[in-house]
Amino acid sequence: MPEGDTVYRTAKHLNDALAGLVLTGSDFRVPQYAELDLTGLVIESVVSRGKHLLARVGTVSIHTHLKMEGSWHLYRPGSRWQRPDYQARVILTTNEWVAVGFDMGTLEVIDTSAEESVVGYLGPDLLGENWDAATAVGNLAAAPGREIHVALLDQRNLAGLGNEYVNELCFLRGVLPTRAVADTPDLAGVVALAHRVIVANRDRTERTMTGDTRRGRTGFVYSRAGQPCRRCGTRIQRGRLGADPLKLRDTYWCPRCQT
């Protein structure tokens, strides 16, 4: 599933290209909106909220969430798409661009005034203009018995972190993913680091946690099970955690560097 920095870049890319343009066509390939036509309306803006994307067109917002397979692409009219036509769920056409949303995990059209009904549950957005670190810390601390890995992934606490970021943050702070929030030292420091790292990566296509963008050198623990820790050489371990037993997430840690 894309992390908040990927959705942020997607929204910025779409907004830079489309904001202020008039739709010459719209095609919603889901039954609920099959007859909806936004032709003639102006694309006001495209913004991200955590891992959610809101394309504001006239007085409505197209709310999408990429989930595991989704992506937005921009094409010049008449150019070849990089994904097959049957995967397209929404197509927005202007004289200059064709924006295609493929395999959206969520696709709905709502009044712009009702955006909070779909994203209002989110905690402070790590990449938002009104980022509020104190509220994020308070949200985490409100459930002291939760594993820190699970708490950081909960978008109601703070919005934008995915599994890669959370595993890497636990390593950088020297805590096991299973450590309880109450036993995690300096929650404010954890949140500050989360903000610093995701901001550093928000404009990169190649995410890095180590500062090294070379292939295979960008992370400390994520997806490195069985490989030596970059700090101490101990083999990285792998497990699974999650608030929902049916949606467990992979965890990675160094048994020596993290306690």
Image: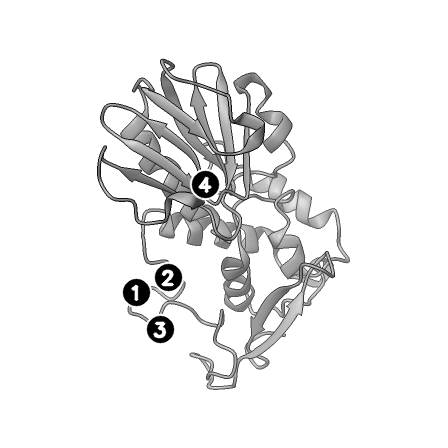
Label 2, residues with CA under 10 Å away: few <14, some 14-19, many ≥20: many
The residue singled out by tag 1 in the image is 213
- Colouring scheme, one of rainbow, by chain, secondary structure, one colour: one colour
Mark 4 → mark 1, Cα distance in angstroms: 21 Å
**What residue would you read off at disc 3?**
216
Which element type, helix, strand or loop, lies under badge 3? loop
Q: The residue under label 4 is which amino acid type?
A: Leu
Q: Earlier in the sequence, mark 4 or mark 3?
A: 4
Circles 1 and 2: CB distance less than 8 Å?
Answer: yes
Whichever of callouts 4 and 2 sits on the residue coming sooner in the sequence is 4
Viewer-nearest residue: 67 or 81:
81
The residue indicated by pointer 4 is 127
In primary-sequence order, the first of circles 4 and 1 is 4
Secondary element at tag 4: loop
Q: Position of residue 166 (x, y in %)?
A: 55, 59
Residue at image mark 2: 208
- The C terminus appears in which quarter of the rendering? bottom right
- Tell me which amino acid carries mark 2: Thr
Percent x, y of residue 31: 56, 31
Q: CA distance from mark 4 to mark 2?
A: 17 Å
